[in-house]
Amino acid sequence: MNSDKIVSVYGYGRFGKLWAEILAEDFHVKVYSRSGIAVDGVKEGIEITDAKGIFDCDALFFCVAISSFEEVLKHASPFCKTETLFFDTCSVKVLPATWMKQHLPQGCKIICTHPMFGPDSYPPKDKPLAMVMSNISSKNDEFQQWFNYFSSKSLHVEQMTPEKHDQLSAYSQGITHYVGRLFEELQLTTSPIDTQGYRSLLQVMEQTCNDSWQLFLDLQRYNPYTERMRQDLHNSIEKLNSALRKQR
């Protein structure tokens, strides 16, 4: 990749901050947040800019919650340039891809991404972390350059359609966050006789509940396949309970 590229990160929450710092290892990075960014909140070399300056770049990553993404795109559209390559980083893909095609100016280059990790799991400790990329309307060589770039950052990059991503994610990420919140609702805690399996369950709860409640809602509400996942989970619980009742 060209180290002279200017790469912008729109949104500076926990993930946006991590993403900016990863990109800043190789690019000049600009950041913007609608809620403001403290000067001492960014690493040296990362530039804080305003709502217009963030669009003066070669590539821009939207790091905002999917619940606010469509509104952000509507406000951003007048400032977007067709020579800029636009990415999302939402945890679901079908709706973000649709919204970017609808609201960004005609002719814009778009790549949908889902880095399937957050600040609590980066950098990877033993094996590469997963990332999904979907080429919506970028040039093939440009897409390949970014695919290769992220692969060089200790990430296992998979190319797939937004539809395929959401189908798989509903039964992996969606169910993990759902079960983690379920464990929290049960108020599970440690005990002197914990098994390793139980400790692993507590780790799931701690990791998922360390993410925002908004992320949990977004994963469940905006992925078109999570309702079926929850119904399948409910049916499986009922099947097990029925089997236990028959053994009495």
Image (cartoon, rainbow, N blue to C red):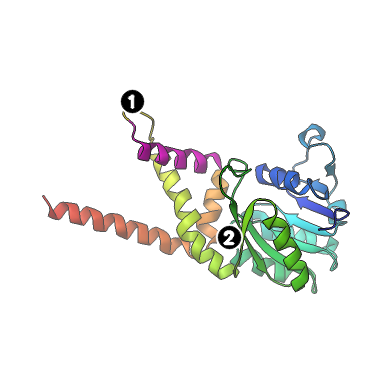
- For badge 2, the amino acid type reads Val
Element at label 2: loop
Q: Nearer the viewer, mark 1 or mark 2?
A: 1
Q: Quadrant of residue 100?
A: bottom right
Q: Which residue is found at the position 62% from the left and 42% from the top?
A: 119
Q: Is residue 235 left or right of residue 31?
A: left
Element at label 1: loop
Q: Quadrant of residue 228?
A: bottom left
Q: Quadrant of residue 235?
A: bottom left
> Residue 92 bears which disc, if any?
2
- For badge 1, the amino acid type reads Pro
**Dominant secondary structure of the magenta stretch?**
helix
| Viewer-nearest residue: 74 or 243 | 243
| Viewer-nearest residue: 245 or 111 | 111
The quadrant of the picture occupied by the N terminus is: bottom right
Residue labelled with disc 1: 192
Q: Which residue is found at the position 38% from the left and 35% from the top?
A: 188
Q: Are marks 1 and 2 in contact (CB under 8 Å)?
A: no
**Magenta stretch?**
194-211
Q: Is residue 210 magenta?
A: yes
Q: Is residue 146 magenta?
A: no
Q: Is residue 207 left or right of residue 139?
A: left
